[in-house]
Protein backbone atom coordinates (compact mmCIF):
# COMPACT_ATOMS: atom_id res chain seq x y z
CA UNK A 1 0.00 0.00 0.00
CA UNK A 2 3.05 2.25 -0.03
CA UNK A 3 2.76 3.23 -3.70
CA UNK A 4 0.20 6.03 -3.85
CA UNK A 5 0.95 6.86 -7.49
CA UNK A 6 -0.94 3.96 -9.05
CA UNK A 7 -3.15 4.71 -12.02
CA UNK A 8 -6.69 3.36 -12.35
CA UNK A 9 -5.63 0.26 -14.25
CA UNK A 10 -3.03 -0.67 -11.65
CA UNK A 11 -5.56 -0.21 -8.86
CA UNK A 12 -8.08 -2.43 -10.67
CA UNK A 13 -5.39 -5.04 -11.23
CA UNK A 14 -4.56 -5.03 -7.51
CA UNK A 15 -8.23 -5.32 -6.56
CA UNK A 16 -8.72 -8.24 -8.95
CA UNK A 17 -5.68 -9.95 -7.44
CA UNK A 18 -7.04 -9.43 -3.94
CA UNK A 19 -10.45 -10.77 -4.98
CA UNK A 20 -8.89 -13.88 -6.53
CA UNK A 21 -6.83 -14.43 -3.37
CA UNK A 22 -9.88 -14.15 -1.13
CA UNK A 23 -11.96 -16.50 -3.27
CA UNK A 24 -9.12 -19.01 -3.62
CA UNK A 25 -8.66 -19.06 0.14
CA UNK A 26 -12.39 -19.57 0.64
CA UNK A 27 -12.45 -22.55 -1.74
CA UNK A 28 -9.33 -23.99 -0.11
CA UNK A 29 -10.89 -23.73 3.36
CA UNK A 30 -14.10 -25.34 2.17
CA UNK A 31 -12.15 -28.19 0.56
CA UNK A 32 -10.15 -28.79 3.74
CA UNK A 33 -13.37 -28.87 5.77
CA UNK A 34 -14.83 -31.46 3.42
CA UNK A 35 -11.73 -33.66 3.80
CA UNK A 36 -12.37 -33.76 7.54
CA UNK A 37 -15.79 -35.33 7.00
CA UNK A 38 -16.18 -39.11 6.89
CA UNK A 39 -15.92 -40.85 3.55
CA UNK A 40 -19.29 -40.87 1.78
CA UNK A 41 -20.55 -37.65 3.39
CA UNK A 42 -18.29 -35.25 1.50
CA UNK A 43 -19.85 -32.78 -0.89
CA UNK A 44 -18.19 -31.37 -4.03
CA UNK A 45 -16.78 -27.87 -3.68
CA UNK A 46 -17.85 -25.29 -6.22
CA UNK A 47 -15.04 -23.13 -7.50
CA UNK A 48 -15.43 -19.48 -8.38
CA UNK A 49 -15.95 -17.80 -11.73
CA UNK A 50 -15.05 -14.50 -13.34
CA UNK A 51 -18.33 -12.89 -12.34
CA UNK A 52 -17.65 -13.63 -8.65
CA UNK A 53 -14.13 -12.18 -8.96
CA UNK A 54 -15.45 -9.00 -10.55
CA UNK A 55 -18.27 -8.66 -7.99
CA UNK A 56 -15.85 -9.00 -5.08
CA UNK A 57 -13.36 -6.60 -6.70
CA UNK A 58 -16.17 -4.04 -7.01
CA UNK A 59 -17.02 -4.48 -3.33
CA UNK A 60 -13.38 -3.93 -2.42
CA UNK A 61 -13.23 -0.87 -4.67
CA UNK A 62 -16.35 0.65 -3.13
CA UNK A 63 -14.83 0.15 0.33
CA UNK A 64 -11.55 1.77 -0.72
CA UNK A 65 -13.38 4.65 -2.45
CA UNK A 66 -15.45 5.60 0.62
CA UNK A 67 -14.82 9.10 1.96
Image: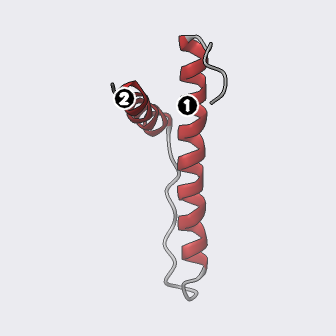
Q: How was the colour assigned to the protein in this rendering?
A: secondary structure
**How far is the residue under mark 2 from the one under mark 1?**
13 Å
Q: Which residue is disc 1 drawn over?
A: 16
Q: Image check: 32 left or right of 60?
A: right
User: In what element is the residue under mark 1?
Assistant: helix
Q: Position of residue 48 (x, y in %)?
A: 50, 46
Q: Which residue is disc 2 drawn over?
A: 62
Q: Residue at x 53, y 48 (%)?
A: 23
Q: Residue at x 62, y 30 (%)?
A: 1
Q: Position of residue 11 (x, y in %)?
A: 56, 21
Q: Nearer the viewer, mark 2 or mark 1?
A: 2
Q: Quadrant of residue 36?
A: bottom right
Q: Residues within 10 Å of mark 2 (few under 14, many from 20)?
A: few
**Residue 7 sits above or below residue 46 on the image:** above
**Residue 40 sits above or below residue 59 on the image:** below
Camera-nearest residue between 62 and 58: 62
Work out which residue is located at the far bottom of the displayed protein and give it.
38
Amino acid sequence: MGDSNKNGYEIRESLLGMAIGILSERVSNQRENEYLKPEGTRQPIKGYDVDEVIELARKLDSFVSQN
